[in-house]
Image (cartoon, grey):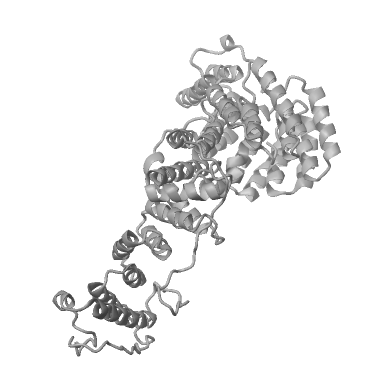
Amino acid sequence: MSDSSLSRFVQTHKVALAVTAIVGAGSVAGLLYYLNQQSAGLDDSSKSKKKNKNKKKKKSEKKPATVTANWPSSNIPINESTGLPNVTEDLVKGMTKEERNKWALALKETGNQYYKAEDFKPAIECYSLALLCKTDPVFYANRAACYAAQGEHEKCIDDCTEALKLNPGYSKCLLRRAHAYENIEKYEEAIYDLTALTIYGGLNDQSPETFLERNLKKLANKINEERFSTLPKELPSSSSISSFFGAFAKENIDLDESKYPDQSCSQFLVKGLNEMAKDTYDNYVNADVLFHQAVTSYEKDSSNTDVKHAALAYEYKGTFDFLKGESESAVSNFNKALSLAPRCRTHVLLGLVNADKGDFASADEEIGKAIKMNPEDPDIYYHYGQLFYLMGDLDKAKDNFEKSKLYNPENVFGHIQLACIAYRKGESATCDELFREAKRKFPTSPEVPNYYGEILFDRQDYAAAAKQFDTAARLQEVLPTFNIGALPLINKSAIFQVNKDIAGCEQLLKTACELDPKSEVARINLGQIYLQAQKVKDAIELFEEACRLSRSNDDRVQAISLMEASKIQLKIKEDPILSAKVEEILRRAGIERNA
């Protein structure tokens, strides 16, 4: 609801959560680390700053390489066609250590000259010959740079791996191998290398984090497509559904099922509305089925059906499709409803579908049609205000929420949003008074104290916020409906976290998960707490659940990012070298890590 809503924390802090999850946000005390994006060139005293280019120059533009080779005096013959020495294993065996080192250095320096001239084939040959003389991680690294420049990513990975066996903290190889892994779509391996790179750097590199963010997003999108794209579409939590329908006026229809013919469109419609009134998840699932049956009944025999009832059946079927994330089906059903019996709410719902897609112009157009149809309709102005609120036009949002109070005074959310707008404008006293006014009008509403608690939390008045969340939770507990469900518990858990009461925070979120089995927010937040306590496997299970519960692709991709980042953390814990480095960093930072 309000822009300060803690329940939307995940959606508004996606990158931060995904990044910190890799080493455990809490265990590193919120330390964000960043990754080096700069292209890694050769390891050489000259430190060439020339960036590698994947695109080759046209032959007509390529300048011939100017290479001066200073070979050590020796009996090794030079190949006239290549200009390179005929170094073989047998010849190397007959050399002294000093001779091998001299030849290795000369071959590396010559390879560097070829590399700088972008003549990669002889450069590769030079580094290969240097490796015959001496096993050195720099030679593998430089040859890997040549392979990377030629797009030979597998070979680049192989050479980086050999270099890292000799020097596990070799930053250029970690970065270069991560790039290569990304290019062949092995994003998990890329993320692991980037994590290792940062750990070896002490988690304090100040470069941007976009490289990691990009790979996490690519990995999450890939997993989403492979594992979750075929999941059946399900309704969100009952609290979400309850809040959604709570912003609309009550239907003016006789709900006595016995007054309608058995198995008729009208009877199925009324049964669905009665199921919705019970406000539990199972009842909403039943309602979804009944609205589908109402539409099917009408399509089989429309002769004896009230056309307005048929339009309502299509509208409600479309609404439930929208709540399940099936936008195309929703639009189709809304259009059928409009063709039978147009009403303002259907246009508003079409506007919400467009707004959900980010198409605010089309959303504005649809709501404009509703206003033209009936400028005093109670379903219009709250949602029109929401549209302007999302676009950042607080003045127009305020005007529409005021109209919502006028035409639909029983919509508690219009009152709450007016208070939130006052807060965003810096009018704290007005905000407080509007919340007091809302409490007087809606004394049993858990929404009012919950969202007022969010405002108080944002002010860092944690004691007052906790009282509001407690009030909201008590009101919700005695209500027969599931207005906001576990949201007050989720919000209060943030106060426990601020106060470093991780055990209390964990218990509240466990209760929230039990109270609302469909809340992905509760599971994501509890997963974060488990990461702080180093219960990584438990965190992964929760993120997996959140993936399945997420309504939208964006939310699911975020949950997948957290899940995969946690798996990387688990791999780090299992790596004795990296795990020891993390422990060392934490000790230096004075942070006690949980066992």
Q: Position of residue 116 (x, y in %)?
A: 39, 81
Residue 43 occupies which quadrant of the picture?
A: bottom left
Judged left or right of residue 426, residue 306 is left
When the figure is inspected, residue 544 is found, relative to residue 107, above or below; the finding is above
Q: Position of residue 106 (x, y in %)?
A: 31, 82
Residue 17 occupies which quadrant of the picture?
A: top right
Q: Is residue 423 visible?
A: yes
Judged left or right of residue 225, residue 389 is right
Q: Is residue 333 visible?
A: no
Q: Quadrant of the N terminus?
A: top right
The residue nearer to you, when weighing 44 against 345, is 44
**Which residue lies at the image location 27% right of the left edge and 76% below the top edge?**
130
Judged left or right of residue 291, residue 223 is left
**Which residue lies at the image location 58% right of the left edge and 43% below the top edge?**
11
Residue 251 occupies which quadrant of the picture?
A: top right
Judged left or right of residue 77, residue 351 is right
Total marks shown come to 0
Residue farthest to the left, as pictured: 90
**Which residue lies at the image location 45% right of the left edge and 58% below the top edge?**
197
When the figure is inspected, residue 396 is found, relative to residue 239, above or below; the finding is below
Q: Position of residue 316 (x, y in %)?
A: 57, 28
Q: Position of residue 507 (x, y in %)?
A: 57, 25
When the figure is inspected, residue 568 is found, relative to residue 462, above or below; the finding is below
